[in-house]
Image (cartoon, rainbow, N blue to C red):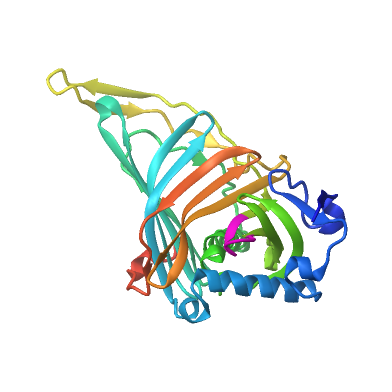
Amino acid sequence: MNWTPVDLNSIAPIIPGMRAMVLVVAAALSAVSLGIAAQDPQDSAEATLAAVRQALGGDTALNAVSSVDVKGTLTRTTAQFSHDETIEYAAILPDRFVQMTENTSNLGPLGTSYHRERSGFAADDLILDSETDSPIPTPTVAARADLTPQEIADKRAKNVIAHKHTFANFVLPLLGASPPAHPLTFTFVGRVAGPTGSAEAIDATGPDGFVRHLFVDAQTHLIVGIAWMAKPIVTISVSSSMTMRSSSSSGSGTVVSTSPPPVLPANPTKDLPEVQWQLTVSDYRKANGLNWPHRLTTEFDGKKWEDIKLGTYRVNSKINAAVFRPSK
């Protein structure tokens, strides 16, 4: 079968500017060659996702999952630099999810500093907080002091939606179905050149403008890529000063005074166009009846962003309820 590239907008108007994963369709496409009967695109999507769920372990095993907890390492690249953190995902279905990161930085004569961040949602409540013991002033974000209670509530609700989108990215390759807290509609699009070769493309759409393009490997029937459009990450350089008293005997230092923390703009991407984001899903391994991925690599606009390597999944194990405590 000869596959011919076509204008993406003529096939699926909701897929703008796909470059790295290029959608291709046959000039003459038969139902037999696809292995899917000529049917409604939503029915074709369900048939493809049924094969995905079978490859993941089957409906019986997947439907028995009530909670997931997994730890790993995260390498994040910003501008020309990269740093490592530990990362943990925890979820209790249907509507609790949190991502936690931790790292320790070497500050030279100031010793080391610890930073922890927690983000996610519990039903419709926001989880978003962080802590650090760094002596270096932490930048603050410019914000209006006169926000009304409704504006504050709207801002929290917008953050909850963003974290539900992150949850969808995490759970779609695990379950091959809509996240319980974020129901989606699936539509079959066509054949694609995906991260691992020939694949089937499915559009997933949901509330609040959610759009994801799933890439299912034609051989393994596993989700190997997810693409979407969103604002880029921007890097902002800031500086601050501090006065330190050093100890000649120990080589360490004590901070005597610091300048006020830098203030960052409230929304530095406001006037920037959306760019393509890509999540490559790989290193599937079978354990306890489930075939789940252990590597998640994210890029935006062709730039590296995150490389996550996951360890052993704990399924249906008790998770400390405190990790899902909503932020104040």
Q: Which residue is rendered at x = 85% and y = 49% of the image?
A: 7
Q: Quadrant of residue 243?
A: top left
Q: Is residue 145 magenta?
A: no
Q: Position of residue 151 (x, y in %)?
A: 62, 59
Q: Is residue 35 left or right of 118 when viewed as pictured?
A: right
Residue in the foreground of this view, choosing between 17 and 20: 20
Q: Position of residue 321 (x, y in %)?
A: 35, 70
Q: Total marks drawn? A: 0
Question: Which quadrant of the rendered structure holds the N terminus?
Answer: bottom right
Residue in the foreground of this view, choosing between 204 and 209: 204
Residue 158 in sight = yes
Question: Which segment is the magenta one?
Answer: 217-225
Q: Is residue 219 magenta?
A: yes
Query: Is 81 rendered above or below residue 160?
Result: above
Q: Position of residue 164 (x, y in %)?
A: 57, 63
Residue 116 in sight = no
For this orientation, the residue located farthest to the front is 1
Question: Which quadrant of the rendered structure holds the C terminus?
Answer: bottom left
Residue in the foreground of this view, choosing between 278 and 149: 278
Query: Is 146 rendered above or below residue 264?
Result: below
Q: Which residue is rendered at x = 47% and y = 30% of the image?
A: 81
Q: Position of residue 97 (x, y in %)?
A: 47, 66
Residue in the foreground of this view, choosing between 266 and 308: 308
Q: Quadrant of residue 270?
A: top right
For this orientation, the residue located farthest to the top is 248
Q: Is residue 97 left or right of 47 when viewed as pictured?
A: left
Query: Is 249 rendered above or below residue 27?
Result: above
